[in-house]
Structure formats: C-alpha cells, structure tokens
Image: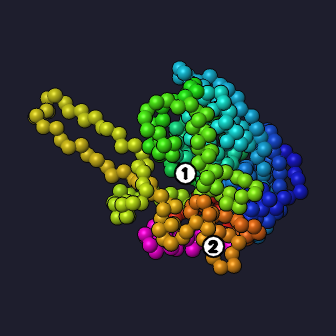
Amino acid sequence: MHEITPIPLSALTTIATGGAPERMLDATTAEGLVSALRETWSRGDEWFVLGGGSNLFVGDEQFEGTVIRVLTRGIDELPSPHEGRIRLRAQAGHGWDELVAYAVEHGYAGLEAMSGIPGTVGAAPVQNIGAYGQEIQETLVEVELIDAATGEISTVPASELGLGFRTSVLKHHYGSEPERRAVILSITVDLLVARERIVRGEQLRRALTLGDDAPVPLSWVRERILATRASKGMLWDQVDPDTHGVGSFFQNAIVTESVARALPPECPRWPVSPDLDTVTVIPLASYGGLIPAPAREAADVKVSAAWLIEQAGIRKGFKLPRSRASVSTKHALALTNRGGATAAEVAELARFIQSRVHSEFGLVLQPEPVLVGVEL
C-alpha cells in the first residue's frame, strides 16, 4: 500500500459527487490491502473502501477519514469437485465485467447475464448483484475476507453471507450498519464448462427474445445483454450523461403477494424465488384415500420500480427546476449527473421521486447505492 494525495471522490465515482477525503491509500496487492486496512483500523479512523465507484453516492462535504482504493487484480482457475465445472478465484479489485468476459471467452457459463454490470469483483457479493434473473449467489462458492472487528482473515462459504435480493450480511443498508463489517479480498465462483447453454430464466429469455429451448452461445448472450444495457444508458460512456449515475438508483420493490395484487395488473412483476412443486409424503398406515391440499406459503413478489416511478408521473429526462441532476432519458430508474450536479441536487431529486411513488402506491423505494455523508 502507499498513501497518495487525496483525489476528489467526484473524480472516482460514476455519479461524480463528493469531495476529497482527509486521507487516501492505494492497495495494489492483497497483502497491501490487508496492511492498509489493519493500519487504518488501528488509527481509529472513519473509513471505507473504494472499488470502481459505480455503486457509491457521496455527499458534498469532505469525508473526515480514510478511503482505501482496492486496486488488486487477477483471476486463477481452480478445479471444481463437480464434473463438468470449473472454479474461478478473482481478486477483489478486478473489474466485474472483465471477470464475466473472461468466463465467456473461455466457455464457462453462469455469469453471462450479468455482463456489463459496473464495479469490482469484491463489491459483487456485498449486494448480491444480479440482472435478468441471474444472481451471483447462484455460482458463488466462497469469499476470502478480513473482519474489521478482529483484523483476522478467513474464508467464508457463500451460505454464511445471508445472500438475498440485493443484500448480504456485509451490506451497509441505508440507515443501518452491516451485520458483519468486513472487506472482501477475493471471491470464488463455480461455473459450468460449456460454450452454449439452454436459457431457462423467464426474465433473461424475455430480454433475449427467445422463443424455443435451443442452446445459444454464451458470447451471443453477452453481446445481447451489453446491447440492451447500452440502450438503457446502463453502460458507462464518458460522452453520454445518461450513464453518469449509479445504474439503478432504486431497488425493485419486494412486496407480499397481497400487496402485489393491489397494484394495477399491468405493473411488471416477478416471483422472488421459483414456485417449486412440493412432494407430499403420507405414511401408508395413515392413508385414508384422500390426499390433503398442500399448504402453500404466499411468495414475495418483485415489482418494477421503473414502472412505479413512471406511473407516478416521473418521466424519463425529468428534473427539478434549476437542478443539474435528472432522471436518465433512457431509463426511469437511473438518476444522473448532467454536469456539475452536487450530491444535494441528486438527493433532492431522489426524495421527490420517493414521495411521488409513496403518494401514488404506498410504497417506499429504497436506494440501491451505498450512501456516504448524504441522507434521503
């Protein structure tokens, strides 16, 4: 690690807000990252780690603490205990889309629908990233991390990370601290060795406009996903202000089945988890000729936040008077910096959208990025 002259966070985040922190450290190796963290913790500084800056919304005031830039890189291929599969271990600072590109190029399936998601590998499990029905929890085996409380390094199975819809025990949710404050050093995913595969997920099939179950090449899926994301302004482009944000600013709302039924029928919705057939086992000695109706728990439903926003009267390109922040002209879920917008301007727009959706539908949209020094 080495200490550098602090760089304004507006130059290191895709939404381009935030002043320079008091102190900034660069870590280009895993050992350097561990040293930087332990040294910062021993000082008692306020701190956070910075990867690609694509999921971070920082306030306008100086951050009074240390920012550690995670610049570690590298992908290692490891054997999988499952036939026909392979494991990839990637360092936390490696670009997520670079990992996806590597997997697709080498014929390893399981990440292709998440092509084009910005940020680094280390940030991916923190919010259980996903797109078009595919999530990292489907392939994640384990993470290597260092705990802030003890400074100890450990390898943690994915099953112990509390992975859910855009969440984990590591995520700093708005208004609360993470259940486990730690920094990921590397991740390991288990992938199918195959250059083409049958696409099963409804959301992905719809995005790819697939009509049958014929296998399709991974490279074709990646190309189509990248094109789709670009059309929505979800791929970073220096000259396109529609990409100067944090991607989806609000999470799709997770509601109960009864709440979903109360929404207009045209509101797009998807089950949070597949509705699997259950097997009823009845002991032969107690079988009386009737099979009881299976107990059914109401499944949670994911509803489209973009649809809710637009139906609340917030159109693409909307902005408040005299503000330099606006809704993307391509996607209602993205809030963008049109050039020189302050964090206060972006936050004002976000609060206005939240109030409109709550007024129309009774739902409070939750922010998806990590907020530092800013409140909604």
Confirm whether the magenta stretch covers residue 15.
no
x%, y% of residue 197? 51, 30
Residue 234 is left or right of residue 285, and the answer is right
Instruction: In this rendered view, identify the residue nearer to me: 187 or 94.
Output: 94
Name the residue: 48% across, 43% down: 209
- Mark 1 secondary-structure assignment: loop
In this view, 242 is above or below 340: above
Q: What segment is highlighted magenta in the picture?
A: 345-363
- What secondary structure characterizes most of the magenta part? helix
Instruction: In this rendered view, identify the residue nearer to me: 274 or 89.
Output: 274
Find disc 1 in the rendering and name its residue: 166
> Is any part of residue 35 visible from this angle?
no
Residue 319, disc: 2
In this view, 129 is above or below 288: below
Instruction: In this rendered view, identify the residue nearer to me: 52 or 371.
Output: 52
- Find residue 301 and report its image quarter: bottom left
x%, y% of residue 274? 40, 43
Q: Residues within 10 Å of mark 2 (few under 14, many from 20)?
A: many
x%, y% of residue 58? 71, 63
Q: Amino acid at mark 1?
A: Arg
